[in-house]
């Protein structure tokens, strides 16, 4: 027997195995309760969960949410005439019906809804008698040829070309601002949170499908945050399918590895119990699943299988010496519980560091992943050995284990050469070169989105095709930065305020990546020009306050009720990281130069402002989070092994994987954003398991007096093969994500596949090479 097997049973071991029926009963009762809770988990997300609420931009946006409309969460429906243009009776009737249909969809801010049919959309012209104007679609409109010609004339005079009407007159937009919460129709005193999936489905069913079928000459395009999130949530069905495929693949590979059906079934079932417990706890604590936290059940399953494989492997090896299944289970528990516990605690502490990032969805992911790791301690480290103590390991598996232990393994013998005095330096040099190359290429890694539209979805997805249509046909894109000019009450129309807006618009329009900018200055200049017979020389700001006050009377929606806040709307070509960085730098510089006690240039709102704030938070948090992850994992290893050298052997391969992972993201054109940042931390948290298991077993053999290479060979025969199997098995499981209809999940699948494999390779290849330089076997034998 080994020294681990000769150690007296700990209090925890006696408590568990002397009360096995109670352990199983308690787990069964917990499972019943949490299964009921898990069955009630629903996809849910919200606009505010996706943004960094503590960032100054977001705080300013929320502070002025009631002052100005359309600063953030909006949906735009572009109604295209596939033949001809919008000036037909049939098209205009369809547009009217879509406008009215959208008006009554729950969650729409009806006061801000805007289309050609909105009374607030007006035209203005200068005549010999002064200004004339009215609704773009007058009350006298009847769909006749004369009415349509009048409509054409009104649109030309409305200033809406490129905004509500396409530049080629073949489509127009219904602009729909949304409410995050809205009164319950059945009880106006209660508020209902906007259900993005339901809202997205209503847009599809009540607008796109209905009116495209009703009028074959109409094509509907829908973009906006709510639509994008709705499409992502719909993709969760596909993720559930991938989860089922991953379970099937894992079961087959695990059966091949263990040669025992009942133990394979026990591992898969206890791991699924862990997933159910995690989902049940999530619902019990008031959380749901969003598109970004959908990877958590996968991670819980992956981590559970990893530890389950180690347990079954340990029990199979112990069965060769034990007299019965109970003794084998107790021996394996005695040997593997502490390394498994340390590995899981390291995972949990690593996941908790994600709480440092001030974005709701990432924090919920951290909580969900930490809860998942906590339940694995109960299901896979405690419940699984107890179950195996009853059902045992199949005779074929025990026989196979004995044969494996007795015979020589050429493969493991060859791999053990990584610990050889001549090979170890070569491995370290290769690792250093790879590290340097990864650091160099990783400098190309960008913060934020690198593509137009919704990078979370594939370029050929319906949403991105719709977004591309809007970008190509309108002067005002869906990427809007809102800079707010804040003054004292009734002072936003002063020459000083309007002059600052005018200068800001000029600066922004001359910044690369900006399409156009509008504000109340745009309206003021047009009105002043009109009051002076349309002479272009008068298209400027007047210093006469009465003239200015009169000129902004028609700038509805471009200043708040008491004229203390006025927005400058800057329309961008896209929301790529470089574009946002360049535009925000220009806006920040202008704000710093022109803000005074009387006039403040406040940043920022609009979806571009939100994206910029998110990018800043991620850029500031990325390094801090990684330092915290590695610090937490290192402390756990130090407490366990009480050796800096041992900690370095476990941690340094993870560092190499992180650096190479960043280089891979740069090579694949994947930016660091809300969807991908957690993967970096999760990869470290999961990867540490391999190193802890291998080093723990390696140290055991070194204490028995073996040389490093011989000890590593024995480690590979036992724990090493389980680590190798786990890495390959989990990589194959998450590789199914690469085929997801949701691009960011495909990206995460690719990254997790890479990290599972490289963490496994690092533990098997680099750890023994580092041990050759850092570990003193004589000192370990002296402590034995």
Image (spheres, rainbow, N blue to C red):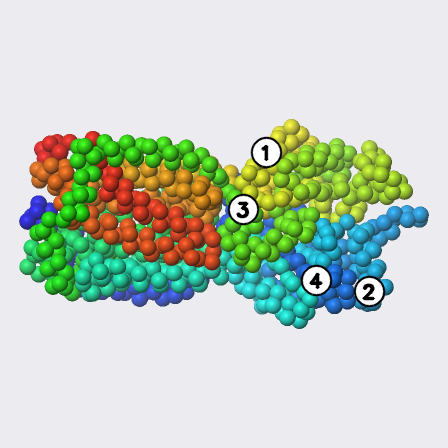
> Which numbered disc, 3 or 1, marks the residue that appears first in the sequence?
3
The CA distance from mark 2 to mark 4 is 20 Å
Task: For marks 3 and 1, give the CA distance.
Answer: 20 Å
| Badge 1: residue crowd in 10 Å (few <14, some 14–19, many ≥20) | few
- Rendered location of residue 394, percent (x, y): 14, 64
Q: Tell me which numbered mark, 1 or 2, is placed earlier along the sequence.
A: 2
Give residue 81's mark. Answer: 4
Q: Quote the CA–CA distance across marks 4 and 1.
A: 40 Å
Tell me, for residue 197, which label it has, or none. Answer: none
Residue tagged by mark 1?
585
On screen, residue 206 above or below 653:
below
Q: Is residue 191 visible?
A: no
Distance (Cα) linking label 1 and label 2: 47 Å
Q: Is residue 388 visible?
A: yes
Q: Closer to the camera, 295 or 37?
A: 295
Q: Secondary structure at mark 2?
A: loop
Residue 458 relative to residue 574: left or right: left
* Among numbered discs 2 and 3, the one appearing first in the sequence: 2
96 up-or-down from 62: above or below:
below
> Marks 2/3: CA distance?
43 Å
Q: Which residue is mark 2?
A: 141
From the viewer's side, name the closer residue of 306 and 345: 306
CB atoms at circles 2 and 3 under 8 Å apart? no
Q: Is residue 496 above or below residue 156?
A: above
Give residue 772's quadrant in the image: top left
- Check contact, mark 4 vs mark 3: CB within 8 A: no
| Marks 4 & 1, CB-CB < 8 Å contact | no
């Amino acid at each position: 027997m080994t020294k681990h097997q000769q150690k007296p049973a700990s209090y925890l071991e006696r408590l568990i195995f002397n009360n096995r029926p109670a352990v199983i009963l308690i787990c069964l009762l917990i499972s019943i309760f949490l299964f009921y809770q898990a069955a009630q988990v629903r996809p849910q997300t919200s606009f505010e969960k996706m943004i960094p609420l503590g960032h100054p931009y977001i705080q300013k946006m929320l502070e002025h949410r009631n002052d100005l409309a359309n600063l953030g969460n909006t949906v735009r429906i572009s109604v295209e005439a596939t033949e001809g243009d919008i000036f037909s009776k049939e098209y205009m009737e369809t547009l009217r019906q879509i406008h009215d249909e959208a008006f009554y969809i729950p969650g729409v801010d009806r006061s801000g809804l805007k289309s050609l049919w909105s009374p607030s959309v007006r035209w203005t012209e200068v005549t010999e008698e002064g200004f004339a104007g009215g609704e773009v679609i007058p009350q006298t409109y009847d769909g006749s040829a004369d009415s349509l010609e009048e409509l054409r004339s009104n649109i030309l005079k409305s200033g809406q070309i490129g905004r509500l009407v396409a530049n080629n007159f073949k489509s127009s937009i219904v602009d729909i601002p949304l409410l995050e919460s809205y009164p319950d129709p059945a009880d106006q005193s209660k508020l209902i949170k906007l259900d993005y999936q339901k809202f997205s489905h209503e847009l599809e069913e009540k607008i796109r499908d209905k009116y495209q079928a009703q009028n074959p000459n109409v094509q509907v395009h829908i973009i906006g945050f709510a639509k994008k999130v709705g499409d992502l949530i719909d993709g969760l069905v596909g993720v559930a399918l991938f989860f089922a495929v991953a379970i099937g693949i894992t079961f087959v590979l695990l059966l091949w590895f263990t040669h025992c059906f009942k133990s394979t079934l026990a591992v898969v079932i206890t791991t699924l119990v862990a997933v159910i417990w995690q989902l049940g706890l999530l619902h019990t604590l008031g959380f749901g699943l969003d598109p970004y936290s959908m990877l958590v059940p996968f991670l819980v399953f992956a981590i559970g299988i990893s530890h389950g494989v180690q347990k079954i492997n340990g029990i199979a090896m112990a069965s060769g010496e034990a007299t019965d299944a109970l003794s084998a289970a107790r021996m394996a528990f005695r040997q593997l519980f502490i390394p498994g516990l340390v590995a899981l605690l390291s995972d949990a502490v690593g996941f908790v560091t994600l709480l440092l990032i001030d974005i709701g969805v990432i924090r919920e992911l951290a909580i969900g992943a930490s809860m998942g790791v906590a339940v694995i301690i109960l299901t896979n480290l405690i419940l699984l050995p107890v179950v195996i103590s009853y059902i045992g390991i199949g005779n074929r598996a025990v026989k196979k284990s004995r044969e494996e232990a007795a015979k020589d393994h050429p493969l493991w013998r060859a791999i053990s050469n990584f610990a050889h005095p001549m090979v170890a330096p070569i491995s370290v040099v290769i690792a250093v070169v790879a590290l340097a190359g990864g650091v160099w290429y990783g400098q190309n890694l960008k913060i934020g989105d690198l593509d137009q539209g919704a990078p979370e979805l594939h370029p050929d997805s319906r949403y991105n095709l719709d977004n591309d249509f809007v970008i190509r046909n309108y002067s005002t894109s869906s990427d809007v930065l809102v800079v707010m000019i804040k003054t004292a009450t009734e002072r936003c129309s002063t020459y000083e305020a309007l002059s600052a807006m005018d200068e800001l618009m000029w600066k922004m329009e001359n910044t690369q990546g900006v399409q156009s900018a509008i504000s109340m200055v745009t309206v003021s200049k047009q009105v002043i020009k009109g009051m002076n017979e349309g002479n272009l020389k008068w298209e400027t700001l007047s210093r006469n306050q009465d003239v200015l006050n009169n000129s902004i009377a028609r700038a509805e929606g471009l200043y708040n009720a008491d004229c203390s806040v006025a927005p400058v709307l800057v329309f961008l070509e896209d929301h790529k990281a470089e574009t946002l960085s360049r535009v925000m730098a220009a806006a920040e510089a202008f704000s710093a130069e022109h803000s005074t006690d009387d006039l403040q240039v406040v940043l920022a709102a609009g979806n571009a402002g939100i994206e910029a704030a998110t990018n800043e938070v991620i850029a500031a948090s990325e390094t801090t989070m990684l330092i915290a992850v590695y610090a937490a994992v290192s402390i756990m290893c130090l407490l366990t092994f009480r050796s800096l050298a041992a900690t370095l052997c476990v941690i340094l391969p993870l560092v190499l994987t992180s650096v190479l992972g960043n280089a891979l993201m740069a090579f694949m054109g994947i930016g660091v954003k809300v969807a991908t940042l957690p993967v970096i931390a999760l990869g470290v948290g999961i990867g540490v398991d391999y190193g802890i298991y291998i080093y723990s077993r390696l140290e055991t053999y070194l204490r028995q007096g073996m040389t490093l290479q011989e000890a590593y060979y024995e480690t590979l025969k036992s724990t090493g093969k389980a680590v190798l199997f786990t890495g390959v098995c989990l990589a194959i499981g998450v590789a199914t994500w690469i085929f997801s209809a949701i691009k960011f999940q495909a990206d995460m699948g690719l990254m997790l596949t890479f990290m599972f494999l490289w963490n496994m390779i690092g533990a098997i290849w680099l750890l023994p090479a580092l041990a050759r330089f850092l570990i003193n076997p004589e000192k370990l034998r002296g402590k034995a």
